[in-house]
Structure formats: C-alpha cells, structure tokens
Amino acid sequence: MTEFFKPYFTIKNQCIGVITETNLYIPSLILSFQVFQCSFVFLQPNIINQTVETLRIQWIISFDTIHNFTETYQLINSLILNNEHNLQLWKYCEEIDVLNFKDIFCVMQTSGSTGDNKIIKIPHYCIENNAININKLFNITQADVIYWGTPLTFDPSLIEFFLALLHYATLLIIPKYININPSYLYKCLFNIGNITFLQTVPSVFLRFTSKQIADILLHSSLKILAFGGEQFPAEILNYSRKPPLTLYNLYGVTELSCWATIFKIPDDFTSESEVPLGSALDDVFISLYDENQELSKSFGEITVGSNSRYCLLSNDEHSFRSTYSVKTGDLGESRNGNIYFRGRKNRIFKRLGQKVNLDFIETIITSETSLQSKVIYSNKYRKLLCFVLVDKIYDKITKIKLLDKLRMKLLKFLKDYEFPDFIDALTYFPLTSHGKMCHRSLEKYYQGGLQNIELKENHEMFLDVLRQYLPIDKYVNSDQLYDHSFIDLGGSSMLGIQLLSDLEDQIQAHIPDEFINLLFNEQLKSCLEYLKVTRLKRKNTNTNIHKTIKKPKINVIDSDLVYWKYDMRGCVDASPAGFANSKYCYVCAGSFSGIFIILNTNGEELFKHTFSHEIEATPCISPCGNFIYIGCGNGTMYCINVNTKKIIWEYPTSEKIKSAAVLLESCIVFGSYDSHIYCLFKETGDLIWKTQLNGGIKADIIYNEKQNVLYTATIKGSCYGLGVTGGAICWHYQCNSPIFGSPCMIGNDTIWITVTGKLYCISSKGDLQWTFDVNSNVFSSLINENDLVYFTSHDHCLHELSCSDRKCKIVRKIELNGEISSSPFLYRHNNNLYSICICNNGVLCIVDLNMGAVIFQCALPNESFSSPFIFQEKIFVGCRDNNLYCIDFVKVLSG
C-alpha cells in the first residue's frame, strides 16, 4: 500500500478520508498513513459531504463500494488486493487548501451523546498514552487475541488497535455479515477465534442469549471483558464467572480520547451492587459541578479533564492547552470516595408537573418484570415511549395478551406521571453505528404504530385507550365497565390528561369539554354514548395545530431588579408566603427537591429542612408569625416553630397534600388527595375531626367567618360547605369538571371555577344562582376585589369579571404573554391597584388595573407555575430553574 500511495500523498500533515467497514487491510492502511505523516478519518456515509467540507479533505480511500460523492471527487487509481478487494483512491476535483493536521493521529466524529455531533482531532500521544495506561490493568501480551469489533467511527476501536500493536497481540477481524448476527458472532469469537479480550458496549453484548452469556462468562477463553459507552449492565453480575476472567467498567469521552476512568469489578459483586465509574487513569481528573457551575462534593454534572491529554474540536488549530476539561452531560453522585453514574442530564425532565427520570423508570421496570427495558421521551410526539425486550416473535393475539399483562403490572408500581403513553415488545433494540441504543429508530416504532391503527369507531378506540391506562384485564367484557366511572376504575387527573391526549392522536379529532366532564364525573356508558352520537371536529393534519402567538420581544430580567435569588435544588412550583413576627420579616417556600426554607427579606437563611417528598403547597402562617403549617407530598402536615427552628408536630394522611391549610382560632383545617378534610388542634396536631369528600383536594380551603362555614372543592368537581365544629357537610353541589383553583366569596355567595373555564355561583344554602363560561382552561384561584373577580387562564389573559348574586359579565380581558396556570396577586401601591401575574413560559407581567394595561414584563430564566406574592414591596416568585426570586417592585415601577 505504501508504494501505491507514494506518488499521491506528497503533502504531509493532511487528513485522508476512508470509507470502509472493518477489514483485514485496515491495520496496514493506518500504518501507511504514519509513513506519510498523514492523519485519517473514517467517514460516515450519512454525513460525508459535511465532514469533507469541514476538514477540507483532498483524498478519499474506499473499498468495493459505489459512492454519492462522484460529482466532487474523481477516481484517480485503484488497487486489487488478493484478487478479492478493490481499493479505490479518489481526489477532490478542484484545488483545495488542505488543513494542517500536524501531530494528529486521526479524526473522530462523536455520536452526539455529550451534545451536538462534534469533529474531534486526536493527537498521537493522547490515544497512545491512553492505551499504555489502561494496559497497566489489562496486561495484554503477545499471547492474547483481541476482537476488533468496535465500529471504526467509534474511538474505542483505536484502543483495541493500539493494545494489539504495542503489545504484539493478535487482532481478530470478522466480516460484517457475521458481526451483525449474534449467533454466528458467538461461534466465531468463542468457538473458533478463542478471543481473550473483549471491549464492548453493553447494548451489543446483551444481544447474546442468556445461555450464550452464561457460557461466555463460565467456559470461554475470555480473560478480560470491558464494558464502556453506556451504563454498566448490572444483570451481567447475576451470572457465575470463572477466573481468570475479569470484568471492567470503562468511562470516557471522545473529546479526551478515549477512556478516563476504569473500575475492576470485584468477584463478590452482584446485580444489587452499585458499580462506580472507578479510578481516573494517568493524568486525568474527574469532578462534579452543580447547576450553578460550582464544584460539588455530592452531586452534579460529570466533568473530565487532563493536564496533558488534549483533543482539538473541529477546525481549531490553536496550540495544545496545559489543562483541558469536558462537560460530559452525564450526572454523577459522589459517595464514599467513588463517583456513580446517575443518568444523562437530558434524561431527567418535567412531565405533568412532576420530575421524571427515565433511567429510574427503566430500573424499576426491569426489577419488577425481569425484562430489559428502554424508555424514551419523544419531543416530536410529546409521548413517553416504553420498549421491552422479549426472546421471540409473538403472533398478534399473543403479543396483545403479553402487553396487556405488562401494562397492568406497570400500573401497580409506576406513578401516574411515570406511566408510558406507548408500550411495545421487541426482539432486539436498534443500535447506532457506534453500538449504542438508537432512540430515533425506537421512535419510528411508535410512528409506525400510529400509521397502522385499525379503523374503528370513536367509542371503540376510547375503550382501547382506556384499557391502556387502567388496570383492566383485556378480556373483561366491556358491558362490565359501563356502570363505573373512570375514577372508580383507578383513574386520576394525571392519567386522564394522558388518556385524552392519546385519544386525540388515535381519532385525530379535538376532544370537547363536554366529554372531559363526562370522563371525570359520569359513568363510562355516558362517555361511550356521547362518542357514538357526536360528530367530533377533525384536526387539520396539514397545518401545525399548535400555532404560536407572535409575542413582543421580552428581555431577560435585569440583574439590578433581582434583589436576591435562592437555589432550592428543585423546581419551585409552590407559591411563597411572607410574614412578620416580633423580631423580623420573613418569606418561606418549598420546592420539588423537598427543601423548605425560611429566609429573612434580605435572602439570609433562618431555617432549612429537606423533607422526603416534594413541597407543592403554600405555607400557612400563624397570626403571631411564630408557627408555620406546611403540607408535603408524603401526605404529612408539619408544624414548624419559627423561633426554635424545629418541627414540633406532624400528622400523616394517606395521600399527598397539595393545598394550603386554613388557620382558625384553635385549630387548622386542610385537605388531602386521600379525599378527606382534616381538622387538627393547632398546638399539638391531634385530630379533632375528618370528613370524607368526593375526590382529592387541590384547591385551598376558604373560611366564611360570618357563617362559620368552610368552603372547598375536589378534583372531581364537587363543591362543599362544611361546618367548622364537627366537619358536617352543610351542602354539596356537583360541577361538571375538576376544580383546582380556590373559590372566592361575593356577599353570602361563593364563586367557583372548573378547569374547563365554567364559573358557578352558589348560595350559602348550596343552591346554584348562575353559571358563566369563559371558554378556556383555568387552573387559577379566584381573587375578589370590590366585587370584581380576577383570574388567569390558558387563553393568555387576565380576566376581570363583575359578579353579583344574579349574573356575571366580562369587564375586560388583558392579554399577557402566554398560558397561565398560576394565580394573579393583587397589590395596592400609591393608590393604584396592580396585578402581578407570571406566565407558564416564565414571563413576569405587571398590570396596572386602573389603566387596564401591562406596564412591565420580563422573562425569568425558565418556566414558572408558582403564584407570585408581594411582601415588603418585594415580589417573591418561584421558577423552574430551581430558584426562589426576590424582585424589587418599586424599582420595577420606577424603571
């Protein structure tokens, strides 16, 4: 080969493109490049044009293939190898200024697992030193046989090459048609090739059957089995293995090519044992950085670096730096001197208002079903997709039964917001060219399922979707379901949201509010009858139905306006509260991390406690300011003594608490998602009474002091008046859909609003006075100011309504900057009335209600579902960037 290339490769330090699968001639080809002091890059067919343009490649070498670059490259010469393979040499058709690749061994293109796809220039010493250092543990000798099976476009293949080259070991190279067949590959590696070293991605190794894996670990010639590129496969540790076989966990990034850490698996490790990343290789350091980019000793994004190993990105030709580090996009936890992988940053996100960890869901599914699983979130379809691995292809009926049993099992141990929208069983997981799981291919299984939906009537599709989300046996006769409601059968508000979204996709039609009301409040036969007789409005599939309203440019909030912010280590969806006692003024709030804090108005910490579950409720403060009552996601109500900074009592319920308590003279009253209202002695937390209602309670309770009655509503749309003394139900009115916001009082009447935007005026005796429809989804509470009712909604507006005991009318609607799920806060300042609102997209708006106009708006760094609060002329509001913000209201007005 050297003689063949000699007339052409006259320019040193250029990069040569290579298009080929692994074959017997690659080692000779790589060594030829070293003779000519040239670098090389293995080109990926799908991005050839992009790569050759970026690297300004003059020469391309290919084997036995026809290519799509013949318009820009011309064939110069070819060489027949062993009367079998045709090596072709191509040259760029025009003159080109080649780049300088001095000291660069090769160029790699990342898979994009640490961000966007990158082009990485790997120096000689970087990859060679990595192989030398790692062999201090591997001890490869000339007696070893190394399987060169890693794709050439994935940098671990270079480690396999150098381990063999530097230590005179044998490289075993296998044709692609065998490599892609696990059964053939098993025979070639362990019955014929007798390999002693295997470095592989877990997804590739797990293509072998359980019997084959058991034989490999117990009876093969293998001495070293090293896993890298994905999380260590814990299930491997359930198998017996014999000496001298040693297992390793490898971790690294192409930007520091190739491996950064290594961990030798102890013989006594089982699948219950956590496998750490291991020790850093020579001249490598590994650190964790929190969300504020500060060094963390406990949890954060994994960063790896080196003082000598350094790779260049894309066309960067700067000199090598003394210190180089890479943010991996992986999350790690430091414990007992070890760092443990905790998933990808982009594998943790919010769904239905709750934090979802896809890696955690996979772990739960596998532990409960013994099936290997892969869970992904499709941004394209906004769906959570779950795939499990089965050992054979099933016929359609058997597969339906299998998935039905699996679905029923998942319903038992996954939370509502963790439950997949789509479940399928596959005989193999599709892989990328680097051997990692291919998310795009998995997404196509869902896409294919949508395209192949059987033609059914709407009511039939509803029953099919219903069975996916509820623990109903597939072969229970539908007649047995008709007299039950969605809630009776195990449904919840979150499952309802998922079900309705899926049903819209299936029938390709908008779901009317009438059907939503029926689903949550009526028996299934009413839902089915509605779908049979109602013609639904079809979606327009040729246009984007989620049209974006053009908004004025919103600037990120000026740092001068932020008095302080406090990191609560989790989304702050809860609304803060402010209070004063005999000493100071304070603000308090909770977050999804379970952290609850009390700060003074300068942002200085007085009290901090981390509860076991999220805090979504607003705190309730005693009039003296010495006691705080806060409900938790673990179902417990806590009382905190502000002066002693201690929790003085706690009272458990059987479900989470999302609403604020109301404080009476000697007791506190609060609602729980277990459908009960509780009344406790405020000093001791002892139960006085509890009353069962129809549905969980999200809305805050309000107290009518004049009539000594408590008002509350449930997520099933039931409104109640309760006596304070014993909790007896004075009256009950059933609305047509769930209620999440708190009511308000106008005279002796109460005004309520459902999530579908329908207002109800109910008298003090429980009689309906009037209804009014605002035609938008509403999650806001109602605020009464001089018999004008204010609330926000998903139609992007702040609503102002005039209400009396006889009628309701719209005074005005003030358009804001996006959908709003939180409640407005009304505040008087210098004889002016203002409304402070925050949109779900994080845009904070201040409305002058005298003018009826937005006078100020700015954007927080992330979404917000926290209702703002003003105290001591400061705006307090939570954000999904994990911070509680204190914003100077006076500065905002003066600016």
Image (cartoon, rainbow, N blue to C red):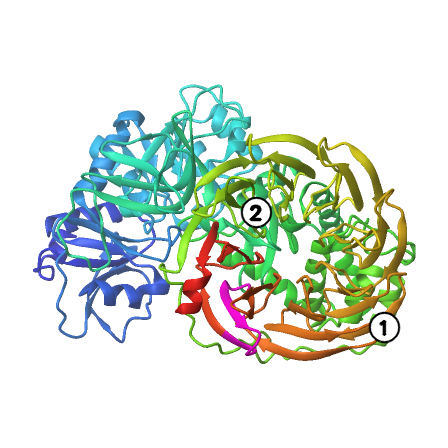
Q: Could you tell me which residue is drawn at 49 percent across and 35 percent down?
A: 233
Which marked residue is nearer to the observer: mark 2 or mark 1? 2
Q: Identify the residue shown where x is 45% and y is 64%.
A: 859
Q: Position of residue 688 (x, y in %)?
A: 82, 36
Name the residue: 66% across, 36% down.
638
> How many callouts does the rendering have?
2
Q: At label 2, which amino acid type do we have? A: Phe
Residue that numbered label 1 is attached to = 532
Structural distance between the alpha carbons of marks 2 and 1: 55 Å
Q: Residues within 10 Å of mark 2 (few under 14, many from 20)?
A: many
Magenta stretch: includes residue 637: no
Callout 1 secondary element: helix
For the question of whether residue 475 can be seen, the reply is no
Q: Which mark is residue 579?
A: 2
As drawn, 45 above or below 182:
below
Is residue 100 visible in the rendered image? The answer is: yes
Q: Nearer the viewer, residue 847 or 616?
A: 847
User: Secondary structure beneath disc 2?
Assistant: strand
Task: Write the start and end of the magenta stretch as one range.
Answer: 839-854
Q: Is residue 846 magenta?
A: yes
Relative to 86, 532 lies left or right: right
Whether residue 639 sits left or right of residue 79 in the image: it is: right
Relative image position of residue 591 (x, y in whole percent): 55, 46
Q: How far across and down, in percent of the image, does residue 180 sit? A: 46, 48
Q: Are marks 2 and 1 in contact (CB under 8 Å)?
A: no
Q: Position of residue 338 (x, y in %)?
A: 40, 28
Residue 821 located left or right of residue 483: left
Work out whether residue 174 or residue 445 is closer to the camera in this orientation and state it.
Answer: 445
Identify the amino acid type marked 1.
Answer: Lys
